[in-house]
Image: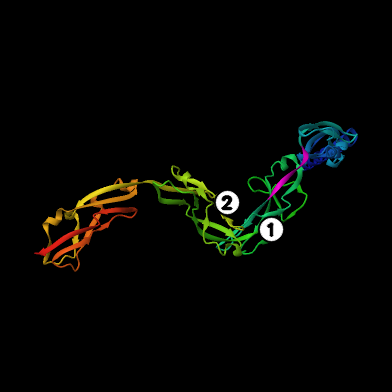
Amino acid sequence: MSKENKNDLTLKIFALIIAIILWSYVMSEVNPPFENEFKNIDVRYVNERALERQGLVIMEPQNASVRVTISGRRSEVLKVSSKDIIAQVDLSGYSEGEQKVPVYVQVPDDVKLVDYSPKEILFKFDKIISKSSPVVVETQGNLPQGYVLGSPIIKPQSIYIEGPRSWVNQVDKAVAFVDITGKTEDIHTTESIKIVDDQGNPVRGVSVEQNVVDISIPVYRVKKVPVELQTENQLPDNYEIVDININPSTIEIKGKQEDLAGVNVIKTKPIDINTLIDNRNVPVELDLPEGVSLVNPDLKVTITLNIDEIKSRTFNYTLADVDIVNLDSALRLDENDLNKSITLILEGSGTKIDLMDKEDIKLKLDLQGFEQGSHRVDVEVLVEEGIEIIRIIPESLDITLIQD
């Protein structure tokens, strides 16, 4: 290295040393102004007990923080830590609802407070309230086939819940869950309570006066039986019941095994038959034995009677209209007999008898075993069900069988 370059390096090192000495002097003796920012300074809540005395509780925010800027001599500012800065809100004197509360900040005496943010915090205060909530039983699992549950008995039937108004107002009910899987006898159990909203979700932040309830649920056998109509009084002489329609015709009943043992039909309570003449779908009450009830308590049984006026009609025939059966092939009926008349007087419901034709009535003469000569025979008349033969004129006919 040349002498000239060596001298230049020496000058540079000397200049650097002088600069360091001057900077150290300024920092230690002059101590220039300096700013520093602190983020997330926790805010202290003061006078929370004042809220409690008013029956209030903080809903939000549960925690708050502010950003603080301080200034001062650099050496003093650098001594300050986040623990030396106090931020607080005074919660006394506020009422229920949303309230803006000012934030107060204190810094050490050797530094100055430049700024902080936020200067207000929006609080929500709720009143502590209580209300009665019904206890509802919800079952889990299934009973065996042929069994149903009765109405549960719950002790107590309702409980008091307490908490902030916003949360208490979310409560729809208190639920106790009971496992009924495979049960065939009455259920007696003690179950814990869950507080839920109208969607079945748990509601937090509320307390209950007790956590369990006693539950009793009867378990019944099920039986399917027909319904039988009971009537009182009589229809007018010229009316008859054509058809009875009971809807539903069978029902499901429930009860203890011993109560159902002798029940094979459920009768209706007596109903005046005359009220059914022009009415359709008349509701009736069931005469249920003691200890027996409907599986579906909302089931309605209705009765419809098809009641028709009784009418009579006369039909005229000749022997030529009669079906001759079992006549010996060597014999035939005297042609003079074919003009003999037969009169039928029939009776039945107007609906049926008004629609009848002569062809709907079958007349038959059975000549099985009859020989040549004169005979007195009866004509057999066949009519549909519900039609009554009142008279056959004449009741017997004189006929002559001759050699063919």
Which three-letter amino acid code belongs to the residue tagged 2?
Pro
Is residue 260 something one can see in this rendering? yes
Give the percent coordinates (x, y) of residue 59.
Answer: 75, 40
Residue under numbered circle 1: 216
Residue furthest left as drawn = 404
Instruction: Check disc 2 and report the residue beneath it.
Output: 297
- Start-end of magenta stretch: 126-135
Residue 20 seen in this snapshot? no
Please state which of the two labelled residues, at mark 2 or mark 1, is closer to the viewer. 2
In the displayed structure, would residue 334 be above or below residue 301? Answer: below
Q: CA distance from mark 2 to mark 1?
A: 20 Å
Q: Is residue 113 left or right of residue 404?
A: right
Question: Is 128 inside the magenta-drawn segment?
Answer: yes
Magenta segment main secondary structure: strand
Q: Secondary structure at mark 1?
A: strand
Secondary element type, mark 2:
loop
Q: What amino acid type is highlighted by mark number 1? A: Ser
Give how far across and how far down residue 400 sits, in percent.
14, 61
Q: Nearer the viewer, residue 30 or 295?
A: 295
